[in-house]
Image (spheres, rainbow, N blue to C red):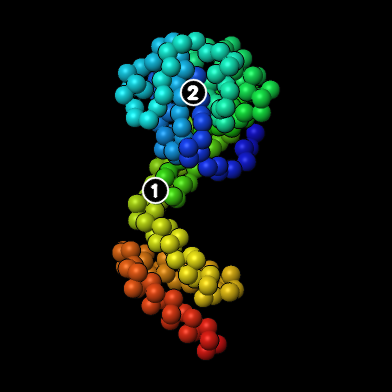
Amino acid sequence: MSYFPMFIDLEGRKCLVAGGGKVAYRKVKVLKDFGADIVIIAPEITTDIFQMENVQCIQKAFEKKDLENMELVVAATGNKELNHQISQECRKLKIPVNAVDQTEDCDFIFPSYVKQGEVTGAFTSGGQSPVVTQYLKKQAQSYVTEYIGQMAQCLGDIREEVKLQINAEKHRKRLYQNILLKGLESGQIPSQEEVKKEIALYCKKLEEE
């Protein structure tokens, strides 16, 4: 089954991870990478999880009431039947849920991903082959670099100014492409002065056309 590649904002949103072992730890690392407000519930929780900053750890067995106010849930208990039960309860409450290694109990899956700043590239094989997604991730790391993340930030910072000066979307797109290509060629993030100069030159060119 192919999964629809939808990116959602998890910044500050309540996410529950049921389970406290190595698998749960890997899922928590991913959720933290995207700013989620994470609660861990499990009778036993590894030291690695306890040592993570800004993660609430509660040592106890999972209960239905633990789902209150949660916006996303990961069932990683190591017990397939319990994971299934958690998934069923989440679906009743319309809470997106991932039950580790139980595709039929998942509303979403964790892809292999590359992240630099606000730029994120993700891959999935629909659960068929982690080897394929890991290969794609490794290939993507060669071009989704820290520099690309910085260039995305640079272009994002000028969006409002560009909108004020250039009405047509096609012309704005061409300007962004020009700035990106020049940055890639030089290997340096353009300064504010250089960006303003580029915008002014482009606007002048449009007036002359």
Specify the farthest residue to the bottom: 208
Q: Position of residue 47 (x, y in %)?
A: 32, 18
User: Can you identify the residue that label 2 sits on?
Assistant: 17
Can I make out residue 105 in this image?
no
Q: Residue at x 64, y 19 (%)?
A: 89
Q: Residue at x 34, y 27 (%)?
A: 52
Q: Position of residue 196 (x, y in %)?
A: 39, 74
Is residue 122 depicted above or below 129 in this figure? below
Question: Can you tell which of label 1 and label 2 is closer to the viewer?
Answer: 2
CA–CA distance between discs 1 and 2? 25 Å
Question: Who is closer to the viewer here, 159 or 171?
Answer: 159
Total marks in image: 2
Q: Residues within 10 Å of mark 2 (few under 14, many from 20)?
A: many
Do tag 1 and tag 2 residues touch (Cβ < 8 Å)? no
Q: Residue at x 49, y 65 (%)?
A: 159
| Secondary structure at numbered mark 1 | strand
Q: Earlier in the sequence, mark 1 or mark 2?
A: 2
Which disc, if any, is residue 116? 1
